[in-house]
Each structure stands twice: as C-alpha cells, then as structure tokens.
Amino acid sequence: MALATASLLATFSTVRYDLYKYGLILTLAALLGLMIGYPIETMFIAIIGLLAWQVHSLNQLYLWVKNPNKHPLSETKGQIYLLHRELNKSIETNRQRKKQISNYLKQFRSAISALPDAIVFIDTSGKIQWANRNARSLLGIRWPNDSELVFSDLVRDPSLDKLLSMPAKHVAAGSSINEQGLEFASPLNRELTLNIKVVPYTHDLRMVVARDVSRLVKVNRMHSDFVANVSHELKTPLTVLRGYLEILQSKLGGINDRESVSIFAKPLEQMASQSDRMQLIVNDLLYLSKLEDRQASSQQTLLNIDQTINSVVESLQGKTTDKNLKIELRLASDLKIIGNNSELHSAISNLIVNAISYTPKNGTICIEWQAINGDAHLVIADNGIGISESHIPRLTERFYRIDEDRSRDGGGTGLGLAIVKHVLQRHDAVLEIDSKLGKGSTFRCIFHRLLPEIE
C-alpha cells in the first residue's frame, strides 16, 4: 500500500512538473508575442517546438529501448523520464529472471546429463530437440550434431516406430507397451538390451528415456529358464506318481479288509488331490514360460470375444450351479479384435474362475464386453469377498497370496492373474483392478488393438 501511494505521488509530481514547464514556456511565448506584435504566431511556434521536443524525446526513448548501451538516456525530469525509469526497472527485472531461468536450465541439463539413462526430447513430428551425453553411448545420437533429425531414422526398430506414433491419449494413460517399456538391442552394441519409454513432457514435446537393462534381462532370463526347466523336469515324476496313485486307489476297492481300506483310503485321496494340484501348477508354470519366451502373440486372427466368453461360461456351468451364482452377460456381438484365441481364452477363463472362486453362494457375476472411447473393454465384476486396496498392486505376481489359506481354499494355483497380465501385455492391453473388502471386485481389461486400427 505504501509503495502504491509513493508511486502515485511520484506520478502526480511528474505531471505537475510537466504542466508547470509547458505553462511557463507558453506564457513566455505569449509575452514575447505581445512585445513584437505577433502573439498568435509566437504561441503557434512555441507549441510546434514543444511537440518537436516531445517527438525527439520519444525517439530517444525508443533508441534506448532497442540498445540501452549504445543510446543511453540522460536523467531528466518529466513523464518521459518517469517512463524511462519504469522501463528500466522492468528490463532489469526481466534480465534477472532470464538469468535465473538460464541457471535453472543449466542445472536441469546438468542433472539430466548426469543420469545413467539416455534422454532425448523430440517434437510432435519426431525430430530431436535435445539429447544428453548418454544418448550417444546408448543410442548413437550426438547433440547438437543430430539436432532436428528424425529420431526413428537414427534408431530403427518397427516396435519403436509404433511406440513413437502412439496417440497421445494412450501414452498419457499408459498403454502396456509404454508402461512396461519396449526392449530391443542397442544400435551401437547388440549385446546391450535397452528399455525405452516415451513420456509426455509438454504440449509439443515428448521425452524418450532409454535405460540399459542388460543385467536385469539376463537375470530374468536365468530365472525364467530355471522355472521352465524345473517345471519340465517335474512333469515326468508327477506323471509316474499320479499313475501309481490311480493304480493303488483302484486296487483298494478289491481289498476285503475294511480296516486297511479305512486306513489307506483318505491318505491316497489326499495324495491324489495334491498331485493333481501340483500338476496344475506345473502346467501353469510351463504356460507362463511359453508366454514370456515370445515377445508377441503368434497366430493372430480376427476374434469374436463374445463367443469366447460364452464358451468359457458354458464350460464353467457346473461350478456356477453348485454355488447358485447368477451370471449376467452384456456382450457386444459386433465388437471384434485381433489376437491369439488360445491365449485370450486362457486369460478370460482365469478371470471368470477367479470371480467364481471368491464369490459366495447366491452371488452375482457381471461380464461385459463393450466399446468405450475407441477401446474394447472386458469387465468382470462380482459381489464377492473383495480385496484390500494394499494388496491390489501385487495381485498379478506369481504365487502372491493375500493370506496363507485363500489360494488353497479356492483351489487355485496362484498363477492365474500372472497369466492374465502376460497375455494382456502381449495384446497391447492393460489390466485395471478395483476392489473393496466385503463389496466385491472389478477386473477391467482394456484393449487398444481394435479392428479399425489394424485395417
């Protein structure tokens, strides 16, 4: 308030000074005109002089604004000087802000350059606008030599072209291919595996982040190979064990000694049940290894997902009847996608079995297949026991259990949702889970790969 008052007083004082100055000049001109007998002409010349001086002062101010160092203004009084002073303050403030922004930019670039990742900024047309030092060692992009060159011309990969051309809504929302990152060999060293993500940066820019994940890929491959090999090796002894158990159970019926039958019947039954469950786990592990081994789904065809859903529901009718569950179907028969029928059948089956397992008797399961905002949505919702929010991020991990007995009581292998996650990733789809304890769960699969985009 005090500053505003002081500024107002300074302005008023300056205006008053100019009025006094112009009034005095005109008064002297009038007196001089009366003395020489030409008062009107003298007043006219004085006014022309004042206007010329004002134009000259404004021109000097203009030259100073263009180049303050070359055309300095002398300190005078009046409104021109007041304007000069305010402009000088604004210029100095802008100079300080520019310096501060420049320092921030230097710090930002230094921080990005220090990162172990390769960072490249590209515009909407894919042209390189900036890159850090690691972009050269990982991607072969040299800054500023490669400025304004198209990123995909320097780093060639069909999957990368697809990622870079992905609509902004999918990049922002998190398409599976961008959420997980795209992995491919470095163009400079084929032994290096890079993980690339594209992040919206501004309205006109996107940030490409490339990270060396060679060691992680190697460890994951060793883990996957180990699981696949162990599962494969367990298959033969399990088959033998189940075979002998079936023989023993069949022979048990021919024994007349009831006491012996009562002793061995229950243990054999439990052994057979657990061997069957172990066989299911081995089969699921082998299937997961198969999904991980290939980067993209093979044998893709045009699919009627509504028919797949009806087929799965029909095959599980016995389970739904035993629990008296109500199945509500809302399926768009004209909505088709491109995909692998076997893999999607497995994913849908696992989701529906999961809903059946954790929905109590007389419950309801709603299954929807609809187009929403250009994407295909598969929604499986139940009014079952629900899941605590803290467990949701880890539900798709292998063998993750909310409690010790839940998976066993449901008869599951603990691998169903892991299979679902991998199948969806291979179809450029995402899985969203919403659940609350006591209020049921909703599993939403969002497919971006629709028929119109393929055609």
Image (cartoon, helix red, strand yellow):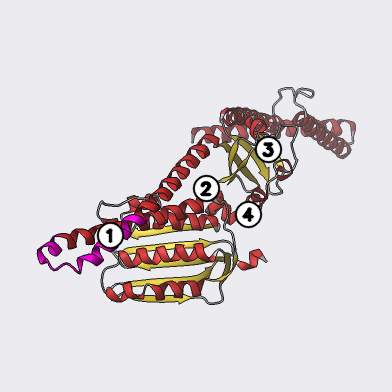
Residue designated by label 4: 166
Mark 2 vs mark 3: in front:
3
Q: Indicate the amino acid at tag 4.
A: Met
CA separation, marks 2 and 4? 15 Å
Quadrant position of residue 448 = bottom right
Left/right placement of residue 243 relative to residue 186 reads: left
Note whether 316 is above or below 130 in the view shown. below
The label on residue 180 is 2
Contact check, label 2 and label 4, Cβ < 8 Å: no
Left/right placement of residue 186 relative to residue 418 reads: right
Which one is in front, 79 or 31?
A: 79
Mark 1 vs mark 4: in front:
1
Magenta stretch: give its range: 239-263
Please tell me which of labels 3 and 4 falls first in the chain.
Answer: 4
Quadrant position of residue 246 = bottom left
Residue 428 at x, y percent in the picture: 55, 57
